[in-house]
Image (tube, grey):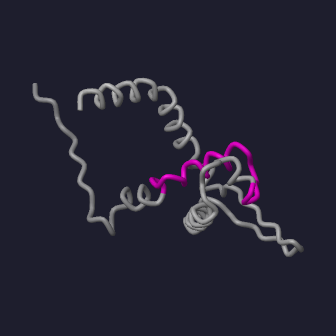
Amino acid sequence: MEIEKKVQHFLPSADCPVRNILARLGDKWSILVLVTLDANGTMRFGEIQKSIGDISQRMLTVTLRTLAEDGLLVRTAYPEIPPRVEYRLTPTGKSLMPHVNALVEWALEHLPAILSRRNAEEKRE
């Protein structure tokens, strides 16, 4: 008996919801920002930057702006002197986190084997 194959057809780039979302979340920093806010709750810009460590101020600004535009986090600016700005996940952002956390757990579980294969491949080259 022949096994039925499921072939997924993706729409052209501009119309494909999978490509659209992965392009926004698949950068170097978005997932780290989401995980940081999920773990710590409401945070200020400097706290997020310290938590991630190697993200530049510019990249953090761009990443926070993009995630806010997509409705995954909310930016709250308080009219104080000096200004205080806080970031937190929205309900939509929180609904994404079980999936992100599953990916993080998968990465942690499989990282040693993946790194081992990478090292073995580098030695062959």
Q: Quadrant of residue 81?
A: bottom right
Q: Quadrant of residue 114?
A: top left
**Is residue 102 on the magenta stretch?**
no
Q: Position of residue 3 (x, y in %)?
A: 15, 30
Nearest to the observer: residue 4 or residue 56: 56
Q: Which residues are magenta?
A: 25-46
Q: Which residue sits at x=11%, y=29%?
A: 2
User: Where, quadrant-wise, is the C terminus in this rendering?
Assistant: top left
Residue 83 in the image: x percent, y percent?
Answer: 83, 71
* Nearest the eye: 48 or 39: 48
Side (left or right) of 68 relative to 121: right
Residue at horizontal 28 percent and vertical 29 percent from the top: 121
Residue 17 percent across, percent down from the top left: 38, 60
Q: Is residue 60 above or below residue 83?
A: above
Locate the N terminus by quadrant. Answer: top left
Q: Main secondary structure of the magenta part?
A: helix
Q: In the image, what residue occupies the spot 52% across and 36% down?
A: 102
Q: Is residue 31 magenta?
A: yes
* Residue at the (87%, 71%) spot, across then down: 82
**Quick one: which residue is furthest to the left in this view?**
1
- Report the number of discs: 0
Q: Is residue 124 above or below residue 104?
A: above
Q: Where residue 14 appears, x then y in whole percent?
A: 33, 69
Q: From the viewer's perspective, is residue 48 above or below residue 74?
A: above
